[in-house]
Each structure stands twice: as C-alpha cells, then as structure tokens.
Image: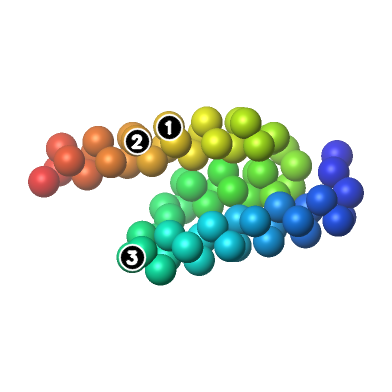
Amino acid sequence: MITEQEKNRRKEIINFARGNVRFEGIILSDKVEEINQKYINGEIDKAEHTELCIAQMKLEHELKKQSS
C-alpha cells in the first residue's frame, strides 16, 4: 500500500510522461494506460512498470509492423 502523497506523485509523473509522448504524436494504448494505472495505484513498482511498458510497446510495434 502506498500513501496518498505517493499516489499523487506517481500520477503527476505519468501525466507528465503522457504529455511528452503526446506532444510527439504518440497516443498510449489502453493496455499501456492499464499498466500506468497499476503503477499509480501502487500495485507495481517502478522497475515492474518500466519492464511491462517496454514489453507492451515492443509487442504493439511488432503487431503494427506485421499488419502493414
């Protein structure tokens, strides 16, 4: 369980990162947003969040390549 302060800190970090990638024209998938929410809620730590996001984005990239 994380504190409300930590939850808010994580939410700010995710919102900042989301804004940065959106500025570059990238919209995060629902699956990545689910991973982000798990991190915000304290269900996973920073290392797990990074690992899961990278794996999901690689998978999505491969699927996009295959469908092109």
| Dot placed on the residue nearer the N-terminal end, 3 or 2 | 3
Sequence-wise, the earlier of marks 1 and 3 is 3
Residue receiving disc 3: 25
Residue 26 image label: none
Along the line of sight, which residue is nearer the eye, 13 or 60? 13
Marks 3/2 in contact by CB < 8 Å: the verdict is no
Between marks 3 and 2, how big is the CA–CA gap? 17 Å
Q: Position of residue 46 (x, y in %)?
A: 66, 37
Q: Which of pointers 1 and 3 indicates the residue nearer the eye?
A: 3
Residue that badge 2 annotates: 58
At label 3, counting other C-alpha atoms closer than 10 Å, the crowd grade (few under 14, some 14-19, many 20 or more) is few
Residue sitting at x 56%, y 43%: 35
Residue type beneath disc 2: Lys
Alpha-carbon distance for marks 1 and 2? 5 Å
Asked whether the beta carbons under mark 1 and mark 2 sit within 8 Å of each other, the answer is yes
Residue positioned 85% across, 43% down in the render: 2
Q: Which residue sits at x=48%, y=47%?
A: 32
Looking at the image, residue 33 lies above or below residue 54: below
Is 16 rendered above or below residue 66? Answer: below
Q: In the picture provided, is 62 more to the left or to the right than 44?
A: left
Side of 9 relative to 20 (left or right): right
Badge 1 marks a residue whose secondary structure is helix
In this figure, which residue is indicated by the disc labeled 1? Answer: 55
Observer-nearest residue: 23 or 27?
A: 23
Type of the residue with mark 1? Ala
